[in-house]
Amino acid sequence: MALKVKADVLKVLDDWNSGKLVRSVELGHVHRMKEYPGGAPVIDLSVRLRNDQERAHAYCFYLIGKGVAEGLTESHEQFLAATLLYRSNFEDLTEEEAIAAESLAWKAILIGWKRAIDGHSEAHYIEVQRPEPVAAT
């Protein structure tokens, strides 16, 4: 059975599409991890990643829009299968950016936008904006 998409998801999707600022969380990791022999992976401080938040959020909201429009709320497996097709439209994303955007999109569809971004320290919240708003029809 398809999930009913929460009203706050539809509102934030509309805000994004119209070019309004949207409160979100940073997507992607800042550092790569490296294997530590005999222990858990550790942060590789020699590599700092640059994550393009507008680009990653553009993919996230694209997925939310597709999920809502095409009813991709049936199951996580169905949603992930669709992302294999959609990711090709965003080839310039890093793997970290794409996975983070897909994760946030599914979580928002599943439990709502506010709950999906809740629980982070204030320093991790950002405001993002679609660079080219979609004209209202």
Image (cartoon, rainbow, N blue to C red):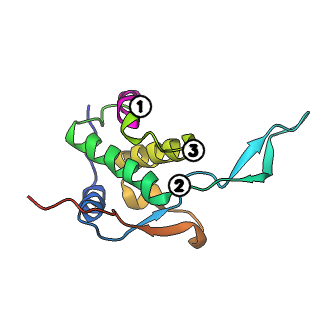
Magenta span of residues: 76-87
CA–CA distance in space, label 3 to label 2: 8 Å
Mark 1 or mark 3: which is in front? 3
Of mark 1 and mark 3, the one earlier in the sequence is 1
Query: In x, y percent, where is residue 22?
Result: 37, 67
Indicate the quadrant containing the C terminus: top left, top right, bottom left or bottom right. Answer: bottom left
Q: Tell whether position 97 is magenta.
A: no
Residue located at (45% from left, 63% from top): 24
Front one among 59 and 113: 59
CA–CA distance in space, label 1 to label 3: 15 Å
Marker count (numbered): 3
| Marker disc for residue 96 | 3
Of mark 3 and mark 2, the one earlier in the sequence is 2
Residue occupying the far front of the picture: 92
Within 10 angstroms of label 2, few (less than 14), some, or many (20 or more) residues? Answer: many
**Kind of residue indicated by mark 2:** Leu
Residue located at (35% from left, 35% from top): 86
Residue labelled with disc 2: 27
CA–CA distance in space, label 1 to label 2: 18 Å
Residue located at (36% from left, 54% from top): 112
